[in-house]
Amino acid sequence: MSNKRFAVLAALTAVVTGLSAPAFAKCAHEGEGDSRFDPCPAPDDFLLPMPGGLQMVFRKIAVPGENFWGSFERVVQIGDPQGEIFEAPQKAMVGGSFQDDQGKRWVYHIGKYEVSKAQVAAVLGQGDMAKGVQRLIEISGNPDEKDLAQLTGEDLDRELSMPMAWISWYDVQNVLAEYNRWCYADKNCRSKLPTIGAQGENYRMPGFLRLPTEVEWEYAARGGVDNPNFAAALPFDRKEWKTYAFVKPNAKSKPRRIGSLDGVSGLHDMFGNVQELTANLFQAELGQGKAGALVARGGSFLDTDRSIRSAARSEVGLYQEKGDAIVEVRSPTTGFRLAIGSPVLPTKGYMEQLQREHQAYMETIRAKTPAGQSLLNGGAQASNALQTAQTSLVQISSTMNETRDPKLERELAQVRSALTDASKQLDLRNQEVCSKSLEEGVFFATLYGRAVRQAEFYERFAALRSKRTDLSATDQQQVADILKNASSNRVDADIYFAKYQEKLSEVGGCGDRLASASADHFKAQIAAGKVNLAGKVAFDLFADHLAALTTKKADFEAWRDAIIQRFKDTNVFNQL
């Protein structure tokens, strides 16, 4: 589309939707666009509609390998050997969310820009920008945000072109939830979403909007495996930082409009401006150790040209003290960009397809992936190594029988005893880890049930209040607040169920012997009266789902309903 035609269509959209005429920002290499959501349009951008005629712009990031389970090329090294203590180099497997080019490659979609204030207002107002701006002011921790209500025309557009910061993680999740609901309900938006399904299957499930994972973010920031300088600290020469990163000394005390600087691999503001939330919780090492608060990547306008790097990680709190109160963190330096994700198991047919591909993956690729080197699988590998060592000792002992050297025989006996003790300790440790995963799985099942119960309660209450015909403005706001609480609980429920699935997979990876022993340990706790009714019911569900998982008959969506129904049938639901 030509720049002139783009401008005409944007102006017509403004007339139809009642929005002010968009401000245009020149982009050095790619043309002109709407500064509120796409200042630097490119022909191969992926555009997703938004309320009020705006768009969310994404870039497709290709990952190697045609199959779901990946290839050796997907295992990349992230981190920085010269970085901070939380940025140690490690291997990670990057994955795609959708197949592209007739199934010949996998891709994931990540936002071309940081999400702007205009885009947040469009979602919160469902197309009514004035209403959206008012809601934005209400959730923002920036005291100057109230001035938005007094701006019009180009002044308003200029301010709405700034990246969205100063809002809590919970508000970010609410924006995602509202955007997803709107997109699924809007035929045009839903038709544009990428889809996933089994080969030859008619139904394909559309994707959903979320935050990018840390691995997705860093892989994109480094330019993908096709970048010959993938391992470098930055995807550009540090001397050129002014071209790509809005940081000190150029930056002063606030960010600048999205897309103001050149992009790297088609992505703008990956370094500086505002740091960006990811889908992960902060851990000392990515994927390992204690889970803390939130993770932000990319650095902000408060960072310097010497401190930015692809591996940089920051922890952002969920809560902070404010006087005598504890409040949600609303950071002036923290924003976000979006990604489009998809379920691992979108349909039953897809599960069958993955099962067919799984055996070859287990026999070849997996042993060299980070998953293949995880604690439980590492324990199994260590056990095998110990068995091999013990077998070798037997062979050596047989050979040494010919020499009958008493000193060597004593030393071999000591080694044999040490290996036996190490094997017992390793087995005990694996058992502890497996039991812990089972207990956490039961716990997440109860949390999931509690979140759903609270959401349903709020939804019923809001429905009853809405039936009244004499609702005042205050009553209407109360209903809106109640529905917001319901939405927040639905988001929490999704998180808890995802963790439940994760724990099922962990226990399934223990092997039958350890999984069975872990179940027996939990049953003993039940018999000793240490587990309440909710825990008992959740354990029975976990055991059923684990059996289905190990026999490859998993149906995660059906399990969501099964958990809630079982809790209701056993009267646990009312006790959560």
Image (cartoon, rainbow, N blue to C red):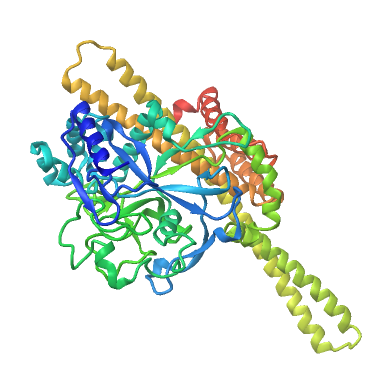
Quarter of the rendering occupied by the N terminus: top left
Q: Is residue 538 left or right of residue 148?
A: right
Any part of residue 428 in sight: no
The answer to which of 463 and 413 lies nearer the viewer is 463
Give x and y (percent) for residue 6.
Answer: 27, 39
Any part of residue 242 in sight: yes
Q: Is residue 310 left or right of residue 505?
A: left
Quarter of the rendering occupied by the C terminus: top left
Residue at the image position 43 percent from the left and 36 percent from the top: 193
Residue at the image position 66 percent from the left and 38 percent from the top: 352
Q: Is residue 482 left or right of residue 138?
A: right
User: Would you place residue 366 above or below residue 162 in this image?
Assistant: below
User: Would you place residue 107 above or below residue 446 in this image?
Assistant: below
Name the residue at the top extreme.
469
Name the residue at the left extreme.
150
Q: Is residue 396 left or right of residue 30?
A: right
The answer to which of 529 and 39 lies nearer the viewer is 39
Give x and y (percent) for residue 458.
Answer: 34, 25
